[in-house]
Image (cartoon, helix red, strand yellow):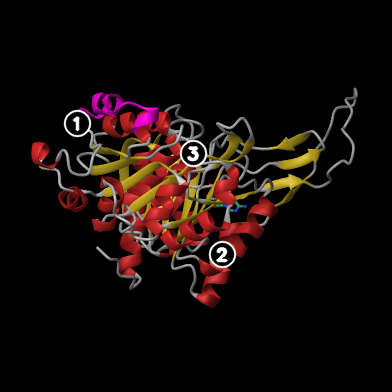
């Protein structure tokens, strides 16, 4: 999605400027045309040549000196930008932007652009927490700019606190979301569930399943990149939360049920990619169950079927307007999927055969069948889970259209 996008990367005077080099490199590797503007103080930390080499483009360091040489006026730069990204952004730069100053190339470009602006602050904790900096950031956000919050960690002063520039990978993810903010899911609230629930047996053991959460996380990320507001309800996984998603962490099916029912009132779509345990141990031992020669018989009790409850809620409220389920099968894929679609009142079901090694649990790819309410079925080839997520979301956009939602594009 970054291919041939014009991205103005503003680098200001913080020690985190060296991390902007990695960001520039990753943007360029993904095909973006990166135009770096460095403030004078940024050049005290990193040489312009570093960025020039990484981006293969001239670096802008002065407001006027280069205009005649390269014909890069701030207005031209501001106009062709698809995104202006300022990383790191100092308290001083943030203050200038909040007040509309335009006394160097970067601030003038921001003032002149209509592109989305994304800011990654980096500074001492006290400067960051100072009410004036917070007020400046709030006023930028109120005007539509996006801020990637700094992290808590070791700071250049030797102290520990909030103010470290966010990780370049997080900034990159947020840059993609800023570029996609007017996408075909803009303004839609999407709830996604992911991972396999764990049902405790005693303080150290649980009954679980092999779901990795990769499909649900891929869906959440893809929806964010198309402009949606995403709540990701996640059972335990080894994955990092997609930047920008509102996370709700749960463990059991009962907790997932509560989280889903608590979030769908305000949702436009629910995508249930989680592998919810159908049963839980009837008793949870308070102490660790000890081994013994007589063996152990587990008694299991059925869990609530979340999608069944959602169907009931929907019958009385009409919300959410789109509900997507998944079906993990080991036989009779299409027939089982059709039965689940009907029983659970779904608009769409994504079914996959989890017996093959390149599809299903923990694999990075999936071979799926997508079936809609009218019984229309598309059999998809082997796809990366991120690609399958894109296909599922294409159907969701189509379902919104049919439900009378009109998108901005
Ligand atoms: N699901 C749910 N609540 C449950 C079990 C499953 O909401 N207690 C959802 C899953 O998130 C998935 C869909 O229902 O979107 C189908 O899940 P699957 O496990 O394939 O089907 P089950 O209904 O559990 O049927 P079975 O296990 O008998 O195949």
Residue linked to disc 1: 57
Q: Quadrant of the N terminus?
A: top left
Q: Earlier in the sequence, mark 1 or mark 3?
A: 1
Observer-side mark, 1 or 2, equals 1
Q: Few, some or many C-alpha atoms within 10 Å of disc 2 (few <14, some 14-19, many ≥20)?
A: many
Q: Earlier in the sequence, mark 2 or mark 3?
A: 3
Magenta extent:
43-58
Which residue corresponds to the image point at 37% horizontal and 49% vertical from the top-left? 118
Q: CA distance from mark 2 to mark 3?
A: 41 Å
Q: Secondary structure at mark 1?
A: loop
Q: Secondary structure at mark 2?
A: helix
Q: Few, some or many C-alpha atoms within 10 Å of disc 3 (few <14, some 14-19, many ≥20)?
A: many
Which residue corresponds to the image point at 24% horizontal and 49% vertical from the top-left? 82
Residue linked to disc 2: 310
Which residue corresponds to the image point at 45% horizontal and 50% vertical from the top-left? 337
CB-based contact (under 8 Å), mark 2 and mark 3: no
Q: Vertical placement of 245 versus 213: above or below?
A: below
Pointer 2 residue Cβ closer than 8 Å to ligand 1: yes
The reply to whether residue 368 is in sight is no
Q: Vertical placement of 30 versus 191: above or below?
A: above
Q: What kind of secondary structure does the magenta stretch mostly adopt?
A: helix
Determine if the magenta segment contains residue 57: yes
Query: Does residue 66 appear to the left or right of 252 in the view shown?
Result: left
Pointer 1 residue Cβ closer than 8 Å to ligand 1: no
Query: Does residue 399 appear to the left or right of 283 in the view shown?
Result: left
Residue linked to disc 3: 165
């Amino acid at each position: 999605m970054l291919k041939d996008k014009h991205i103005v990367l503003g680098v200001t005077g913080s020690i985190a400027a060296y991390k902007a080099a990695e960001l520039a490199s990753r943007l360029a590797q993904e095909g973006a045309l990166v135009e770096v503007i460095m403030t004078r103080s940024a050049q005290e930390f990193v040489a312009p040549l570093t960025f020039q080499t990484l981006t293969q483009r001239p670096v802008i360091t002065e407001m006027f000196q280069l205009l005649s040489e390269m014909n890069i006026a701030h207005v031209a730069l501001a106009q062709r930008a698809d995104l202006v990204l300022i990383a790191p952004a100092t308290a001083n730069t943030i203050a200038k932007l909040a007040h509309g100053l335009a006394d160097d190339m970067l601030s003038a470009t921001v003032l002149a652009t209509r592109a989305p602006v994304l800011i990654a602050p980096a500074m001492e904790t006290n400067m960051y927490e100072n009410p004036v900096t917070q007020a400046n950031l709030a006023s930028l956000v109120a005007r539509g700019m996006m801020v990637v919050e700094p992290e808590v960690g070791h700071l250049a002063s030797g102290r520990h606190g909030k103010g470290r520039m966010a990780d370049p990978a997080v900034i990159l993810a947020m840059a993609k979301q800023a570029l996609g903010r007017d996408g075909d899911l803009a303004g839609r609230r999407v709830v996604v569930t992911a991972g396999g629930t764990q049902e405790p047996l005693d303080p150290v053991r649980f009954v679980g399943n092999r779901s990795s959460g990769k499909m649900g996380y891929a869906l959440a990320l893809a929806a964010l990149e198309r402009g949606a507001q995403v709540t990701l309800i996640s059972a335990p996984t080894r994955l990092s939360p997609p930047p920008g998603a509102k996370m709700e962490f749960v463990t059991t099916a009962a907790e997932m049920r509560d989280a889903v029912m608590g979030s769908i009132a305000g949702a436009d779509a629910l995508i249930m990619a989680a592998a919810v345990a159908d049963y839980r141990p009837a008793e949870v031992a308070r102490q660790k169950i000890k081994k013994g020669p007589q063996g152990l018989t587990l008694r299991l009790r059925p869990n609530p079927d979340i999608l069944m409850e959602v169907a009931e809620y929907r019958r009385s409220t009409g919300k959410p307007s789109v509900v997507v389920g998944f079906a993990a099968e080991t036989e009779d894929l299409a027939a089982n999927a059709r039965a689940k679609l009907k029983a659970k009142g779904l608009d769409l079901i994504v079914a996959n055969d989890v017996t093959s090694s390149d599809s299903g649990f923990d694999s990075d790819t999936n071979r799926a069948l997508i079936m809609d309410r009218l019984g229309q079925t598309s059999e998809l080839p082997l796809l990366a889970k991120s690609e399958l997520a894109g296909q599922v979301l294409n159907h969701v956009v189509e379902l919104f259209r049919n439900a009378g939602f009109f998108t901005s594009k």
